[in-house]
Amino acid sequence: MITHKGKTHPGLHKAIVEPSLFEAVQEKLDANARRRESNDRVANAPLASRIFDIDGQPMSPTFSYGKQGKLYRYYVSAPLQQGNRSTSDDDAVRRISAPAFEAILEQVLRRLNPVEDINCIERVEVHADAVHLLAPVRLLPVMRSGTEDGERVDQDPVDPKRLRLILPVRVISRSGRVTIIPAAGDLGPRPDKALIRALRAAHTLVEWNAAGMPTLTIAPASSHKRSLVHLAFLAPDLQRAILEGRQPPGLTVKRLMQGPLPARWADQIQLFGAPQALHT
């Protein structure tokens, strides 16, 4: 076929390939071009392979087009991308707006350490009421000196080669909006159903003495229950805060069960943070 001035005319020679095969190849080439464009869009995600939800599931970059072809970038948990739906009692953040989230991290990092940018972050953990950033421990002195109210930074208890910076950033999943919790702001109680369930389960594993204190005479059979039972020995202020939805930012079941629990209540509060105050 010969195209001339917008019109197609039959050629003088016999076709080299059948029209059906030619069209199939064109469709394949078009699909590959769209896939390359998609990969280019997703590649523009500085937190790719470094951002995880509260369950440790990777949050992969993705995008969609809105009205008039506007591009929207997101980070979405792997199970959600695979078609799994969140349950009604799942309050974990599974999808966030990438530009808004990246902008907040850049702003905080510039304040804490003007020399570094978002690339110094080795891991980002998105919790319901806080964001945890893990970075090389060499940055600890600089970042510690620049923290503001509500921000906490210390050597990571699990990985001493890293620091853990906890930011009071609450991710609002509606429309991917991200807001920062003010130091003295009032967002009301934020009950964590998983924390409350774990705390109640821990109390079923202990007995109570005459003084009203939990006691443990026999170690639980499974390793999971042996880790879980520690929650029954949390400081009363922390337990009360969990039940009232005033737990410290970033306090989760996984974090409570990751390492040894200090015996002294004051040390526990020092490690996990003080309960949040509710303002009326």
Image (cartoon, rainbow, N blue to C red):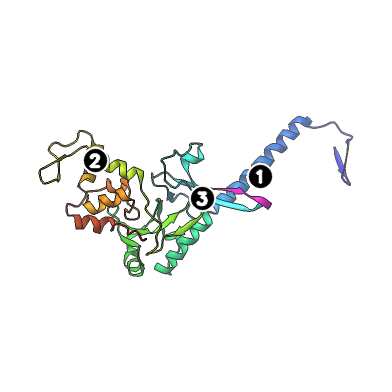
Can you tell which of label 1 and label 3 is closer to the viewer?
3
- Residue pointed to by mark 1: 33
Amino acid type for the residue under numbered disc 2? Ala
Amino acid type for the residue under numbered disc 1? Ala
- State yes or no: residue 145 in magenta: no
10 Å crowding of disc 1: few (<14), some (14-19), many (20+)? few
Check contact, mark 1 vs mark 3: CB within 8 A: no
- Residue pointed to by mark 2: 202
Tell me if residue 219 can be seen. Answer: yes
Total tally of numbered discs in the picture: 3
Image position, residue 143 (x, y; %): 35, 66
Q: Quadrant of residue 212?
A: top left
Position of 214 with respect to 68 (left or right) is left
Q: Is residue 140 above or below residue 46?
A: below
Q: Is residue 213 above or below residue 85?
A: below
SS for tag 1? helix
Position of 197 with respect to 235 (left or right) is right
Q: Could you give the CA–CA distance between mark 1 and mark 3, rounded to whole angstroms?
A: 33 Å
Question: What residue lies at 25% left-to-right and 48% top-to-bottom?
Answer: 259
Image position, residue 146 (x, y; %): 36, 69
